Image: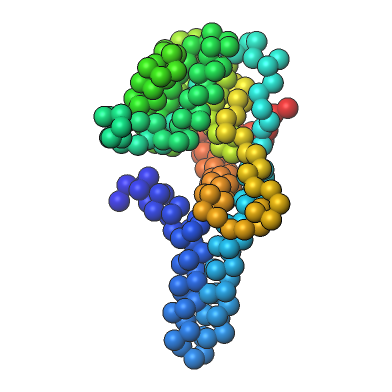
Amino acid sequence: MDYYVWKQLLKNLVLPPTGPLLLAAIGLALLAYRRARLAGALLCALGLAALWVLATPIVADALVHWAERYPALDPAKIDDAQAIVILGGGVRVFAPEYGTSAPGATSLERLVYGARLARLTQLPVLISGSRFEAASMRDFMHQDLGVTARWVENRSRDTHENAQFSAAILVRAGVQKVLLVTSAAHMARAVVEFDQAGIDTVPAPADIGTQREIGIMAYVPNADAVVLSRRALYEGLGWVVQDVQLRFRSGAGLIETRPPGAARQ
């Protein structure tokens, strides 16, 4: 099985809602064995409690805040950037209302903000993503947002490849510093990867977390909170994996690393 398929499978098994539900299911299975009933009851309770907590808006908001390492873009830092890079965040393949593939919700957040920056700065745009993802983003930005991407990188399957393949295009164009547009929670990993690829970045985070529920509703679980918790926890796992990968590459003499995930001031 392809490495990227394994990665997606493991992500879905570990993160909520599947991870806590699997824990609860294992606990229920253990209840059938007399000697393991206490452990089973504890695992079942732990899994259900974890899912309840992660579905609570106040917890989800806290996790998102923890995952976001960069503030909104400071206009004073735009001056010496030479291009804008917008990273893909998912695609709806063969979306019926469009008659073709369309950017997913996360990609749309990034595109709208990236197009805003492009109109503000008049900088050229590079879109990076997988084949269908990059094509849908390019078309949507041109047809619906009125901004034409100068470069389209359409081979990448993860953040590391986003950086490596985009850097190859940018270096050939003489670009050394970019405004990097991706989701706020994803920005820390993206900055490290682009730095390691030799591209200096000015973080321009999109979809910065805001408090979505107030009062008593902040303590009532809902499906949207599960999604937010999942995204934040995924980034946390991503930092761990990125740290291991950077240490391996450094040990193999492939790169000289900065501290993984370090935010530049």
Q: Position of residue 92 (x, y in %)?
A: 35, 37
Direction from residue 114 to residue 92 in the image, left or right = left
Direction from residue 56 to residue 234 in the image, left or right = left
**Residue 155 appearing in the image:** no
* Residue that extends furthest to the bottom in the rendered view of this protein: 34
**Residue visible at 53% across and 11% down in the picture:** 119
* Residue that extends furthest to the right in the rendered view of this protein: 265
Q: Is residue 240 shown above or below 35?
A: above
Q: Is residue 253 shown above or below 80?
A: below
Q: Position of residue 189 (x, y in %)?
A: 57, 37
Direction from residue 138 to residue 123 in the image, left or right = right
Q: Position of residue 24 (x, y in %)?
A: 50, 71
**Residue visible at 62% across and 52% down in the picture:** 57
**Residue visible at 46% across and 10% down in the picture:** 173
**Residue 52 appearing in the image:** yes
Q: In this rendered view, identify the residue nearer to me: 194 or 220.
A: 220
Q: Is residue 195 shown above or below 243?
A: above
Question: Which of the 4 image quarters holds residue 169?
Answer: top left
* Residue that extends furthest to the front in the rendered view of this protein: 216
Question: Which of the 4 image quarters holds residue 156?
Answer: top left
Q: In this rendered view, identify the residue nearer to me: 242 or 21.
A: 21
